[in-house]
Amino acid sequence: MRIAISGASGRMGRMLIEAVLASPELTLAAALDHAGSAHLGEDAGAFLGQTTGVQLGSDLAVLKDCDCLIDFTRPEGTLAHVQACVEHDTKIVIGTTGFDAPGQAAIASAAEKIAIVFSPNMSIGVNATLRLLDQAAKMLNSGYDVEVYEAHHKHKVDAPSGTALIMGETVANAWGKKLEDIADWSRHGHTGARKDGQIGFSVVRGGDVIGDHTVMFLGTGERIEITHKSSNRSTYAQGSVRAALFLQDKQTGLFSMQQVIGG
């Protein structure tokens, strides 16, 4: 399977390149970077001390020779890449977060023409955690308050994180609710007593935290916490490789990592 990587000069892009090169089932076919990048023209494997023969470029026309693009960039860049994938009939794995409703709708529309895996978190462990949350929320559907805590590095620009949001959505769905109807996004000043059935969110930004997420179910006399902590971004790269392989026999459709991990 011929793979293209976007944001190839960034930390995540390099981890994706390393994961693709290590996979016997995948071939690195293209490495994309923004037009003003100082790394254009460099070999995609230079940071590993390898020569791949694939040079970093910015021309999306290379997607015509690729089976799948793995994209971890910014919403505006990803949406442009999605459109290019539609034009060239190239599948795409999207790990970008921070899309607004029109952006999500554009991805759903593109999935009618190409196959897409779209997930706010590509980690296999995070997606296993979501399954645990679904089970816990169904059992703890009364008498427990729920709080979602997340921490990320100081350079992350969206909040709460896409992973925190999908964790909240998982709990809300298990309760038969919509997250937007029961979410408490912030607290300041005299807020009054907490209302039953709400899901609160707490956000930390600082340092180089890769990603910590905890969902707390707080009852009377006890507290249950379900936590996932990332210590290395390579987990996202490995999950992305698995997602690309999942798309190998798909022609169209919008898929989640829950479908990728199966079971």
Image (cartoon, grey):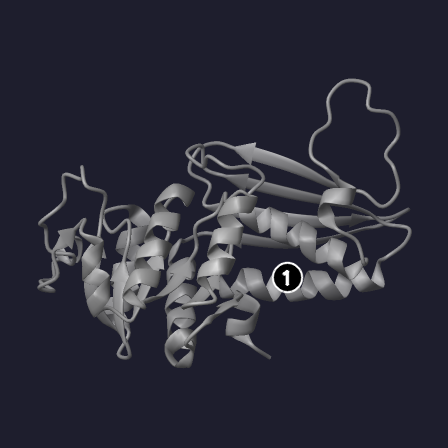
Q: Residue at x 24, y 51 (%)?
A: 8
| Count of marks overlaid on the render | 1
Q: Position of residue 127 (x, y in %)?
A: 57, 63
Q: 108 or 139, which lies in front?
A: 108
Task: Look at the image and tell me whether residue 77 can be seen.
Answer: yes
Q: Residue at x 55, y 37 (%)?
A: 159
| Image quadrant containing the C terminus | bottom right
What amino acid does circle 1 point to?
Leu
Q: Quadrant of residue 19?
A: bottom left
Question: Would you say 248 lies left or right of 175 here?
Answer: left
Task: Look at the image and tell me whether residue 122 can be seen.
Answer: no
Question: Would you say 40 lies left or right of 246 here?
Answer: left
State the SS at label 1. Answer: helix
Question: Would you say 119 lies left or right of 136 here?
Answer: left
- In the image, residue 74 sits, relative to residue 122, either above or below, namely above
| Image quadrant containing the N terminus | bottom left
- In the image, residue 29 sits, relative to residue 231, either above or below, namely below
- In the image, residue 99 sits, relative to residue 116, either above or below, namely above
Task: Tell me the residue that label 1 is attached to.
Answer: 130
Q: Position of residue 70 (x, y in %)?
A: 34, 60
Q: Position of residue 24 (x, y in %)?
A: 26, 79
- In the image, residue 96 sits, relative to residue 134, either above or below, namely above
Q: Residue at x 22, y 66 (%)?
A: 64
Q: Position of residue 161 (x, y in %)?
A: 55, 43
Q: 166 or 220, which lies in front?
A: 166
